[in-house]
Image (cartoon, grey):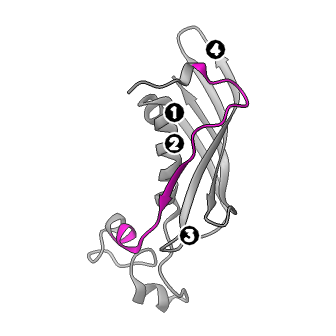
Amino acid sequence: METQASTFEPGNQLQPESLTITLDRMKAYENWPQEKNVHCDEEFAKSVGFDQPICRAVMFSGALDKMLYKAFGPASLQRNNLRLKYLKMMLPGETCVAHGTITEKQEQENHIVYSLEVWLENQEQEKIAAGTARVEI
């Protein structure tokens, strides 16, 4: 996979990546019906006070992983650090969009280290998660 990672500079924005959350996708992720929990089972979610299952945060964070992979290639999966604070829940039928902005580029002897501000927005353009990423290529 060819990337343009070495040409990124502070201030550059990565190409956003979207992910639509569906109950079927949530069930597959949670191994439903073997596993029944608040993230995949409607009856279980209602039994603990939710109207419907809520998406596990790590599942919608996958949109950030995909965005970083498209920008930086396989190195983004091997030499990275992602720190997020989750701000809102996601429900089936909602869409999230991953965003990232390069904040720093450190050129070292045999690699480049990028620091980024990253965030996820829902379809209402509300931040649902925000944090930082560090990728070494």
- Residue that label 1 marks: 71
- Classify 10 Å Cα crowding around label 4: few (below 14), some (14-19), many (20 and above): few
Q: Which residue is mark 3?
A: 90
Relative height, residue 93 to residue 99 (above, below): below
* Disc 2 secondary structure class: helix
Mark 1 secondary-structure assignment = helix
Residue 104 locus on image (x, y percent): 71, 27
* Residue situated furthest top in the rendering: 109
> Where is residue 62 drawn, in percent x and y?
47, 52
Amino acid type at mark 4: Glu
52 relative to 99, above or below: below
Front-lying residue, 41 or 2: 2
The Cα–Cα distance between marks 1 and 4, rounded to whole angstroms, is 17 Å
Residue 136 at x, y percent in the picture? 54, 25
Above or below, 102 against 132 in this view is above
Residue 18 is one of the magenta-drawn residues: yes
- The type of residue carrying mark 1 is Ala
Counting residues from the start of the chain, the first of labels 1 and 4 encountered is 1
Q: CA distance from mark 4 to mark 2?
A: 22 Å
Q: Residues within 10 Å of mark 3 (few under 14, many from 20)?
A: many
The local crowd at label 1, few if under 14, some if 14 to 19, many if 20 or more residues have their Cα within 10 Å, is: some
Residue type for callout 3: Met
Number of numbered discs visible in the structure rendering: 4
In the picture of the structure, the residue carrying the numbered disc 4 is 107
Q: Report the amino acid beneath label 2.
A: Met
Dot 4: element: strand
Residue at mark 3 to residue at mark 4: CA–CA distance: 37 Å
Left or right for 22, reference 80 = left
Q: Tell me where the magenta segment starts and ends, as one range.
A: 7-27
Mark closer to the chain start, 4 or 2: 2
Separation (CA) of disc 2 from disc 3: 19 Å
CA–CA distance in space, label 3 to label 1: 25 Å
